[in-house]
Each structure stands twice: as C-alpha cells, then as structure tokens.
Amino acid sequence: MEPLVTPEWLDRESAAPDLRILDATAHLPSAGRDAAAEFAAGHIPHARFLDLASLKDAGSPVPNALPTPAQFAERMRALGVAPGDRVVLYDDSAVKTSARAWWMLRMNGIEDVAILDGGLAAWRAEVRPLQTGMPAVRPADHPAPAADWSRVRDKAAMLANIDAPAEQVLDARDAGRFSGATPDTVHNLPGGHIPGARNLPFVEVFDEDGRYLRGPTLRAAFEGAGIDLDRPIVTSCGSGVTATVLLFALHLLGKDDTALYDGSWLEWGADPGTPKQTGQSGTDPLTRSP
C-alpha cells in the first residue's frame, strides 16, 4: 500500500481478508469528546476501535509513553490484527492521532500500514456508508514483537544533543506555546522549548481540507521552518502525539532518518533541571532557564 489511501480506495478494499481498519481517534481532554462513543455511533465499515488513548505504558516514568512490545501485542491480538496483515488507520481528531498509531505499528514490525488521507471527515464528505455499534472481533495470534526503539529518544539523549547537536529538533506545537508567548494550557506548564529547537506547527502540513500536503509544497513547509532535510531530525510536541504527524509527513518526503522524543514538553517542561528557551529559535532573542 501507499502510505496514504483515499476513501475510494478504502471503500473498495475494506472487505479484503488481509486488511484491518483501525479507528485511531483520541481527543484532548479539553475537547469534551468520547472517542469510543463516537465510534459506536458511526464508523467506517469493518473498522475496529484501537482505543489509542489507553495504548501506552502506564508504568513508565515518561508521561504518555509508547507501549511495551507485550502491551502492543496484547492489543493487536484483541483487535484481530496478525503479523503480515495490511492495516489502514483513520481518525476524527483535531490532533490527527492516526500518525501516533502509525508510528507505533511500524516500530513494532507492522510495515504495511497506511493512513486514510483526510480521516473520517473525508469519508463522510463523500457520503460513504457508516456502521454503528462495537463489532465482534475474532482474536488473532500476535506474538510480542522485537520492537525497534532505535528511533525513540529519551530525555538524556535530548540533553546530550544540546551540547553536541547530531540531530535537528523540530517542535510540532503552535508558535505561542513554543515561543513562551502563551502558557502550555494543554499540559498546565509554562511555554518555551528545548534549546536550539525549530518550530513547525503540525497543522501546517495539511491543506484546508485536512489532507496532507505533498511534494514541493510539503518540503517547503519544513525548509521554511529552518530544517535541513539532508540532516537527521528528532521531533517533539506536547506529549508525543503531534510530533508523529511531522514524522509521517517526513516519511511522505522519503525521509526516515528521523526519531521521536516521546516524553516531549510534558516531560521536559515539567523538569526544573532541564534548560529551556523562549522566543522564536533562530530569529528572536532567547532566554534560558534555569
């Protein structure tokens, strides 16, 4: 499969025996929305509810941590996803949560995975059918994978990268939170960013219909943020979700020498011992604390 599929393609392929469709919708608490209830009220035929919000390692000191291989495999078994299946992800979330699921699946060995371009909104816009209720699912055999953690960065790696920058750091949050002009009310933290980071708000890799930009237009978005696409990149955001939107967009450009700082600002900003900057990196005067 291509990394992005259209509603037309998915409608045609949805009943294929090797295809699994997963609704990866999750919402910020401030949205006041219930992803499971919305799925039951209307979802793409043959889809299963991933419950992305609960697919994390609650025992990790990292907030909203990626799941362990055992936790991941348990969820795939329950959803009837076997190794070798093709998987299409979609969401109906303002923070485009399919990308987080895409990152999880690929790091856990599921390579043939795509995102529905435009999500559930694009499906509805074409007046395609919806199903209701929670489908019965036959569990699948899914052993715990040998997950690839080589493209996940922790706080120690991010601190080391400040002193000896091997990777460009790209922050997916809005400009106000990144610069410190506004507090990070999403996570109840002051604004600011990791020293040396650049800023590309994740919404800027989509067109007005919520579909991913492609080709030169997408490349220009990264270059306009001061990113050299010939050098490695690690992405960050508030809690490791919208950072994966940028990782998926980079994948569309054929760039995979990338990594995710999973702790993101929720970990970094909450630690009084980490250095922080304010202002727009590379343009405005910077302050550093502590």
Image (cartoon, rainbow, N blue to C red):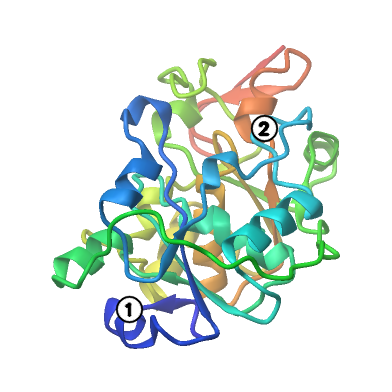
Q: Is residue 221 left or right of residue 109?
A: left
- Residue at screen point 48% across, 59% down: 222
Q: Is residue 49 left or right of residue 151?
A: left
Q: Is residue 3 above or below residue 265?
A: below
**Pointer 1: what residue?**
6
Q: Is residue 202 above or below residue 130?
A: above
**Pointer 2: what residue?**
195
The kind of residue tagged 2 is: Pro
Counting from the top left corner in percent of width and height, residue 161 is at 80, 42
How far is disc 1 from disc 2 in space, using C-alphas?
A: 39 Å
Q: Of helix, strand and loop, which one carries label 2?
A: loop
The kind of residue tagged 1 is: Thr
Counting from the top left corner in percent of width and height, residue 114 is at 50, 74
Task: Name the image quarter holding the C terminus.
Answer: top right
- Residue at screen point 46% across, 48% down: 200
Q: Is residue 289 left or right of residue 209?
A: right
Residue 117 versus residue 123: which sits nearer the camera?
A: 123
Residue 166 showing in the rendered view = no
Counting from the top left corner in percent of width and height, residue 130 is at 24, 65
Counting from the top left corner in percent of width and height, residue 143 is at 81, 66
